[in-house]
């Protein structure tokens, strides 16, 4: 190890919800912790894709917006003062002779650590964009690939393109505040939670299936209307709009982590019951972790973080009997 290099017990790659909760739990177990995050801010997909969306499926929290959840997770994650390094993409891994690891980031900086928790989600995030020649120019005005501020849709005619959970969620969220919401999807049947689909069908949201966006028409750098094509009949229609939200999924790039030698499946990392990858001392949690009963939700990841941290502690201490503790009389978390 380099003389002046700081050695951490745990380095968490990814500052999304699961990485943040893992950092909190790691502090509870008095592990010296570092979080390395690619984006300039914490919160992962919640901050990136749906800060204004209402999240309803976390135990004990009836409803919460993405922004509020992120604020609380960041506050909780910082409880034990982990070192946080933003705008840094982890790329390389080397195992040292003493069993520790050295991670290399995109600037070539090195990060020394005894264990690693990979909480990268599916990797770095980029929305799937419309494959139309003039789409790019409207990205700065009224073509949105994710929604960060609901208020800008107030009183507007909004079209949502997409048929998955997120598109349906946006249609439902916007319905009470927009002047009109139209959702179009290339297939007949939506792919989402049944209750959300039912809610949308029972609302004023106009549903157009099976349709795809064929052309975008604009004036003064804003989209004014789109031509949509019925994929069965071939019929074209024009829809006027103020704002267009396209939710066709996102591209993921796990980058070189996929080549570190861990067993993988469908771009996710296989883990055992301790959330350990096939490399001892390296754990994976959250969306990137792959095991048979995986639940790719925040609630599922909140269970995996503590399991991985306990595994990491066991790896460091070599204490096979290490207890899985819970707090009892801690009045504050001020350390
Ligand atoms: C639109 C949408 C709506 C959703 N709604 C819900 C919902 O209502 N309820 C629910 O429970 N779940 C929901 N989910 C799923 C939920 O967001 C994920 O399960 C959750 O974000 C997973 O958290 P994570 O910490 O594992 O990964 P992520 O949130 O993806 O965070 C991973 C972080 O790792 C960073 N990273 C990646 N690679 C590197 C690298 N090499 N170096 C450094 N940093 C890196 C990324 O920048 C990112 O910030 C939704 C997902 C989407 C896309």
Image (cartoon, rainbow, N blue to C red):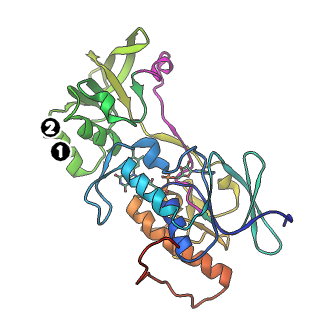
Which residue position holds label 2?
Answer: 203
Could you tell me which quadrant the N terminus lies in?
bottom right
The 10 Å Cα crowd at callout 1, few under 14, some 14 to 19, many 20 or more, is some
Counting from the top left corner in percent of width and height, residue 105 is at 72, 50
The 10 Å Cα crowd at callout 2, few under 14, some 14 to 19, many 20 or more, is some
Q: Residue at x 37, y 49 (%)?
A: 66
- Asked if the residue at label 1 sits under 8 Å from ligand 1, the reply is no
In this view of the protein, can residue 294 be seen by the observer? no
Residue 127 magenta-drawn? yes
Question: What segment carries the magenta color?
Answer: 118-141
Q: Nearer the viewer, residue 158 or 152?
A: 152
- Helix or strand or loop: what does disc 2 sit on? loop
Instruction: Tell me: residue 198, above or below residue 209.
Output: below
**Is label 2 in contact with label 1 (beta carbons under 8 Å)?**
yes
Question: Looking at the magenta stretch, what is its main secondary structure?
Answer: loop
Where on the picture, by quarter, is residue 60?
Answer: bottom left
Residue 93 magenta-drawn? no
Tell me: 120 left or right of 249.
right
Instruction: Tell me: residue 59, above or below residue 147.
Output: below
Counting from the top left corner in percent of width and height, residue 250 is at 48, 40
Residue reaching furthest left? 202
Tell me: 313 left or right of 235.
right
Which residue position holds label 1?
Answer: 199
Residue reaching furthest right? 3
Where on the picture, by quarter, is residue 170?
Answer: top left
Q: Residue at x 61, y 78 (%)?
A: 313
Q: Residue at x 43, y 79 (%)?
A: 330
Residue reaching furthest top? 219
Question: Disc 2 and disc 1: Cα gap in Å?
Answer: 6 Å
Counting from the top left corner in percent of width and height, residue 86 is at 62, 49
- Helix or strand or loop: what does disc 1 sit on? helix
Residue 235: image tag: none
């Amino acid at each position: 190890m380099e003389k002046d290099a700081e050695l951490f017990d745990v380095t968490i790659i990814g500052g999304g919800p699961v990485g943040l909760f893992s950092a909190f739990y790691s502090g509870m177990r008095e592990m010296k912790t570092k979080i390395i995050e690619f984006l300039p801010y914490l919160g992962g997909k919640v901050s990136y894709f749906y800060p204004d969306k209402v999240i309803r499926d976390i135990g004990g929290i009836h409803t919460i917006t993405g922004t509020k959840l992120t604020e609380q997770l960041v506050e909780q994650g910082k409880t034990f003062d982990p070192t946080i390094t933003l705008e840094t993409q982890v790329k390389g891994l080397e195992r040292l002779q003493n069993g520790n690891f050295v991670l290399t980031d995109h600037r070539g900086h090195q990060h020394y650590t005894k264990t690693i928790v990979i909480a990268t989600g599916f990797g770095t995030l980029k929305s799937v964009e419309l494959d139309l020649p003039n789409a790019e120019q409207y990205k700065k005005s009224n073509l949105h690939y994710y929604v960060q501020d609901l208020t800008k849709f107030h009183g507007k005619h909004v079209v949502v393109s997409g048929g998955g959970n997120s598109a349906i969620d946006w249609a439902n969220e916007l319905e009470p505040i927009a002047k009109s919401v139209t959702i179009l999807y290339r297939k007949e049947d939506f792919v989402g939670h049944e209750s959300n689909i039912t809610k949308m069908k029972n609302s004023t949201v106009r549903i157009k299936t099976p349709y795809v966006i064929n052309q975008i028409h604009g004036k003064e750098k804003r989209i004014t209307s789109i031509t949509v094509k019925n994929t069965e009949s071939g019929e074209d229609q024009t829809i006027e709009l103020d704002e267009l939200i396209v939710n066709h999924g996102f591209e993921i790039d796990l980058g070189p982590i996929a080549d570190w030698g861990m067993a993988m499946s469908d771009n996710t990392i296989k883990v055992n019951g301790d959330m350990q990858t096939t490399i001892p001392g390296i754990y994976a949690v959250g969306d990137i972790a792959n095991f048979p009963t995986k639940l790719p939700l925040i609630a599922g990841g909140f269970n995996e973080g503590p399991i991985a941290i306990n595994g990491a502690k066991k790896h460091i201490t070599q204490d096979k009997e290490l207890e899985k503790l819970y707090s009892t009389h801690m009045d504050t978390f001020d350390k």
